[in-house]
Amino acid sequence: MAGRLAGSRAARELARRMGFMGSFRAGLSNVGGGPSLPVEICRRDAGGVSPCISSRVTARPGGEFPRGKVAFVAEMEFLAELLKERINCYRVLDDDGRTISGSSFKEVSKEMALEMYSGMVTLQTMDTIFYEAQRQGRISFYLTTIGEEAINIASAAALTMDDVVFPQYREPGILLWRGFTLQEFANQCFGNKYDYGKGRQMPIHYGSNKLNYFTVSSPIATQIPHAVGAAYSLKMEGKQACAVTYFGDGGTSEGDFHAALNFAAVMEVPVIFFCRNNGWAISTPTSEQFRSDGAVVRGQAYGIRSIRIDGNDALAVYSAVHAAREMAISESRPILIEALTYRVGHHSTSDDSTKYRPVHEIEHWRTARDPISRYRKWVQRNGWWSDENETELRKNVKKELMNAIQISERAEKPPLSELFTDVYDVPTSNLREQEALLRQTIQRHREDYPPDVPL
Amino acid sequence: MLGLMRRVSMSGSIPTSMLRQSLQRILPGLAILERGYSTLGKEMTVREALNSALDEEMSADPKVFLMGEEVGEYQGAYKITKGLLEKYGPERVLDTPITEAGFTGIGVGAAYYGLRPVVEFMTFNFSMQAIDHIINSAAKMNYMSAGNISVPIVFRGPNGAAAGVSSQHSQCYGAWYAHVPGLKVLSPYSSEDARGLLKAAIRDPDPVVFLENEILYGQSFPISDEVLDSSFCLPIGKAKIEREGKDVTITAFSKMVGYALQAAEVLSKEGISAEVINLRSLRPLDRAAINASVRKTTRLVTVEEGFPQHGIGAEICASVVEESFEYLDAPVERIAGADVPMPYAANLERLAVPQVDNIVNAVKRACFRSVPVAAAA
């Protein structure tokens, strides 16, 4: 870690003494072009600094400003608000699940490919069944990841368990990949005593210390600067791991997004910013969310290496995240990935998206552009999967889910003792008094206390 | 001695304990003499107290680091973090871009993953730009994650009115933050408070809001050897009786403690003995100490600089009415700032914040308007 930091810190130290930041490139990686200017330091005087800079570049009219040299031009030219062409989108498989000739991607073994495929199917089945459970009134709330299974599972597959995940809320597939069981998902949704969250949060607000997945938090985009802070912590530790944070197209409008990206670039921390551009933020289409060419161009604006990928292509997602992770860790830098996709489901069980978008559009993305069937074609063509396997898998997952829901539904709710814990590390005296008073009241009026709440 | 010399250059004076230790190595017989040195009459400004507390905690635990605008190169907007960048390097003293929401969120994220950040707000007025992270991301997280994610973070900075900085730089946030379960809220007055409470805050596993005061930074207070020791720590949730009295209880925190003490001095000349309680901790509030005092004196005046409605005094009043109603001989008096955004003009500003006279008058009202406990039918 010392080696990794030394270059940039020595450079900053030198620049600080020279009185301006980052104006020379010695020791810093020269991404983005531009000639490197060798620098001779003449002297350091009390009033400031007068470095002598000799440039080997052929003379172009230019001048020094804080942060370096710029070339002057006589024509007044405004940069266009949009480039002539949108930034290209990386994909490996075509819509029919065939590898595009000439495509470069990270190979997957049969074992990994099948694990990814069954993960995607499990996620889709879990979503369908929990959604139904909410509609039947068995849980109070749910939101699905339908259409974004490739993003969830393939990105998780490209990470390691040491990589710290900061989700928004449409990424339970990462938890699933890491080993969260269907029973554990069900327990959280039902808020029973086995819920790791002790019944404190709404459904789908999963979290797991063991699996390095930070508890889902409702406010949008707050996890983005959190991820940068955690990445900073990883950098200090010198760990070979990165922080990864997910958010939607809507989340990129929050102030936290901008502050976090800017900061991550300045701090040079190993973090992957994964934007799930699924076209909709509840009922707000991206055309009303921003006027830039998506999220990818904003990475460059902050000095962050970025890529746009086909989010419904499992292999593209896998390859891009794999490469991003390597760069983030080895170069200690943030990377932005914008995955284009479509939110096939409603925003949540509190939403009916047919009210603001055409049903045929939803159906098109559910069928013709479905990431699971596209990937399935590739897997089956490799001879690794069959229709029988498919039926078997879906049947087993569904059975396991129904069983898990039954068990969760019948399990006891969290006890009263958990009402007052964890507000602080150690309960304060006023909390202890309140609990004591409550228990006394319960003793005196036993018949008024609900029978289904354990003490 | 090298460490000693570095200390001298930073804090401008040699801490007695270090001097004693160094001399003892040279002159073992000094132990006999040293007893005479124990009351050297040392003084320390609040600024030095905070700086030394930060320095010692950073030295003791490599996970402690500082973030904020101007905390590094500039030595701190109010010089509280002076010398720390040079001593600990840019990885542990981070000069942040101008984004309270950004650096607070990043600090919380670092705390989630095991570091112990101390985040500075140039004034707590600017913390409003980051308040979502303080409340939703920090205060509530341990509870929401069922104890899986603790947030050992400290938010510190000047709070309340300074002088001539107008409404967007003068609000007191004590009531706002003390309202929230999951946060601990401290507000020091003296240098001893500053050192002990900041060290306690940094060591605490819960998120702590640490409300300082710009005017107090330059004020000197006498300080004992015990306070100068690097292991010195004050308990969170305990108030201090700054001055004992028997006729009336005055509660205050931060700068107002000084005003309350001055008022007590004025009152003592008129035969009224006031007990001044320095709250030190707004959440948890030391209700036991406040109520014990009120039961002794039977009268209460609360003093704060912030806006009156839903303020600290309101909570103290409610607590006393709930627990010590029969002991009160007069209604509780609340002294607070005027219910207007802080004006700039010096004459108006003076009228908008409590002055010593206001406290004296309130005490007199509480003393002369007594109602007998058992009202005749």
Image (cartoon, helix red, strand yellow):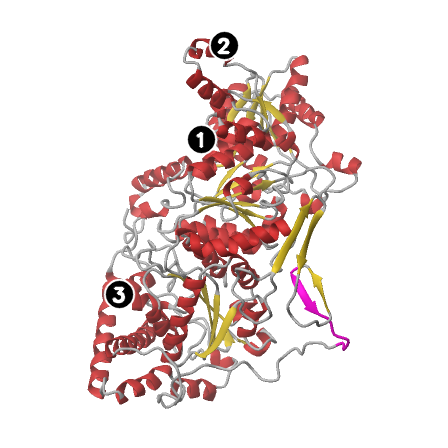
Mark 2 highlights which residue?
B36
Left or right, residue A398 beside residue A42: left
User: Chain under label 3?
Assistant: A
Q: Which of A226 and B93 lies nearest the eye of the viewer?
A: B93
Q: Are marks 1 and 2 in contact (CB under 8 Å)?
A: no
Q: Are marks 2 and 3 in contact (CB under 8 Å)?
A: no
Secondary structure at badge 1 equals loop
Query: Main SS type for the magenta part?
Result: loop
Depth check, mark 2 against mark 3: the one in front is 2
Residue A76 picture location, percent across and down: 76, 76
- Identified at 74% across, 74% down, the residue is A73
Mark 3 highlights which residue?
A181
User: Chain under label 1?
Assistant: B
Residue A98 picture location, percent across and down: 35, 89
Amino acid under label 2?
A: Gly
Residue B341 seen from this side: no
Against A241, residue B75 (above or below) is above
Q: Which residues are magenta?
A: A67-76
Neighbour class for label 1 at 10 Å: few (<14), some, many (≥20)?
Answer: few
Q: Is residue A73 magenta?
A: yes
Q: Which mark is residue B235?
A: 1
User: Chain under label 2?
Assistant: B
Against B82, residue A409 (above or below) is below
Depth check, mark 1 against mark 2: the one in front is 2
| Real-space CA distance between mark 2 and mark 3, rounded to the nearest whole angstrom | 69 Å
Q: Earlier in the sequence, mark 1 or mark 2?
A: 2
Amino acid under label 1?
A: Pro
Q: Could you confirm whether marks 1 and 2 are on the same chain?
A: yes
Amino acid under label 3?
A: Thr
